[in-house]
Image (cartoon, coloured by chain):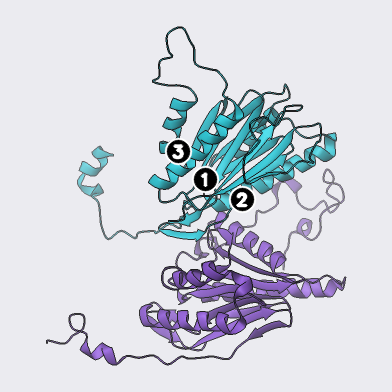
Chain colours: A cyan, B purple
Amino acid sequence: MSDLMAHPYHQYHPQQPQQRQFNPYTENGGTILAIAGADFSVIAGDTRQSEGYSIQTRYAPKVFKLTDKAVLAVNGFAADGNMFVKKVKQRLEWYRHAHSKDMPLRAIARMIQTMLYAQRFFPYYVYNILGGIEEDGTGAVYSFDPVGSYEREACRAAGAASALVQPFLDNQIYFKNQTPALGSAHPTHLPLRHVVELVIDSFTGATERHIEVGDSLEMYIVLARGRSLQGLEGLKDVRELSTPGSNGERLFVLRKPLKRD
Amino acid sequence: MDHFPTNWGRPRNDAVDAYNTYPLHSRPVHHDSFADGVQRTQQPIVTGTSVLAIRYKDGVMMAADTLASYGSLARFKDVTRLHAVGDYTILGAGGDMSDFQYLKSVLNDLIIDEFTQADGHALGPSEIFEVLSGIMYGRRSKFNPLWNSLLVGGFKDGKSFLAYVDLLGTTYKDNAIATGYGAYIALPLLREIMDAKGPENISEEEARSMLTESMKVLFYRDARSLNKFQIGKITATGVEISDAISVPTEWAFAEKIRGYGAQTQ
């Protein structure tokens, strides 16, 4: 390029016909987060939708129930996000009709990677985090980039305040930069109540420090088959979405106001 | 006249050319000589400014002025930007007015198609919004957007509906929405009352005064606005779009302002 520019006949002409290109993307702010426990999974997001400095609405969900044991959080360009969730749900419905069972979590994860990569050259401008219960009964979190790279991990934050939340999670979940007391070890899995508190703290913190985060928190909690409700007792604002007392996985949603400024 | 017989109709069997006049594999390819000349909307030309809407006790009320600007020129001063779609919905548009005109004709065809079914099901605001947001997102995905910010308001089966969609296919629902400049100037005024009272405690008179006051403030501050606007409402009794309204404004103070105009002292 620099060789070309140096040539007298290829000098930059400011008067060249310039094409202004329509930009098909925008950023709608907000943050999502998911944490996997031994036998549960927590998937959360704030509900603010914004563009630039304007709050479009204070309630636009970013977290969606896919099946009884799978929840998907989408963040980035809201129009792409909604369309993507719509298409994932459609594929899951087709699967149900074809196989008379829900698609397992790891299969949903692989399907999402295929669907994202199919749009490799005009990507869905969306970060996905999938949480739920695996077929072996363990809590799982899968995180994706916009073109489909994915991995299973214990926790992940994405979106506007990911740079604020992820380091906090690294410290509090993975115990990064902490040394255990002599003769003890860090736990590999945290109890549900502790995780719920971490999620709430993450979002109140992100709300304080990031202008695109706030209004309210929507947290989905998936419990493995046969797990007790330990960790949920005494929690306010929790509502069960699955049939109470069913012997399958159980799904709860916790809605909590965040600061609106 | 097309002189290639194989183009008259597709042979029943692709392997056998019944007409036997022209090799099937070398049919002439259709070439559109004007393909390079096809223009997409890359910028709006004749534009409308803000649309405001709120949900209130009896349904939804919407307001938009009647100006269609050509850049900074106030080009058309009697354009209706509120449009009834079927019996339960109002569509309000900002942005390119020719794209809006096209959308009106698409939605009109849709309403006629549904009416012709005569199955006792009429399209409500949520269905119309779903179609509309699909069109908007589909067009942005083809890099050929319809350059509008649209509000869909409606009332059907005892439930009111208010939602937004724009040229990118971005959507949301809320109790009070304003597009364009209105999102900066009018929406804070509307939200202040909406947050304090909630839509179920706002009467028709109050809704009307909220919108007229907001339209007045917009006329003071939005250079692409006009003091001539319409208010549409959609309630259990149906759609009603008013004639053009204007509100008294006070400009005497303008003479005393120093420092912006051409005056020397």
Residue at 61%, 80% in the rendered image: B203
Can the viewer see residue A83 in this picture? yes
In the image shown, does A149 or A180 lie closer to the viewer?
A180
Q: Quadrant of residue A254?
A: top right
Q: Name the residue carrying label 3.
A: A162
Answer whether labels 3 and 1 touch (C-beta < 8 Å): no
Question: Where residue B251 sits: x, y (%)?
Answer: 32, 90
Q: Name the residue carrying label 1.
A: A125
Question: Where residue A181 sits: x, y (%)?
Answer: 43, 12
Report the amino acid beneath label 2.
Asn
Q: Quadrant of residue B129?
A: bottom right
* SS type, badge 3: helix
Left or right: B47 in relation to A96: left
Left or right: A71 in relation to B222: right
In three-dimensional space, the C-alpha distance between marks 2 and 1, rounded to whole angstroms, equals 11 Å
Residue at 70%, 41% in the rendered image: A66
In the image shown, does B200 or A95 lie closer to the viewer?
B200
For the N terminus of chain B, give its image quadrant: bottom right
Residue reaching furthest to the front: A234
Question: Where residue A41 sits: x, y (%)?
Answer: 63, 31
**Eye-nearest disc, 2 or 1:** 2
Badge 3 local density, few (<14 within 10 Å), some, or many (20+)?
some
Q: Name the residue carrying label 2.
A: A82
**Eye-nearest disc, 3 or 1:** 3
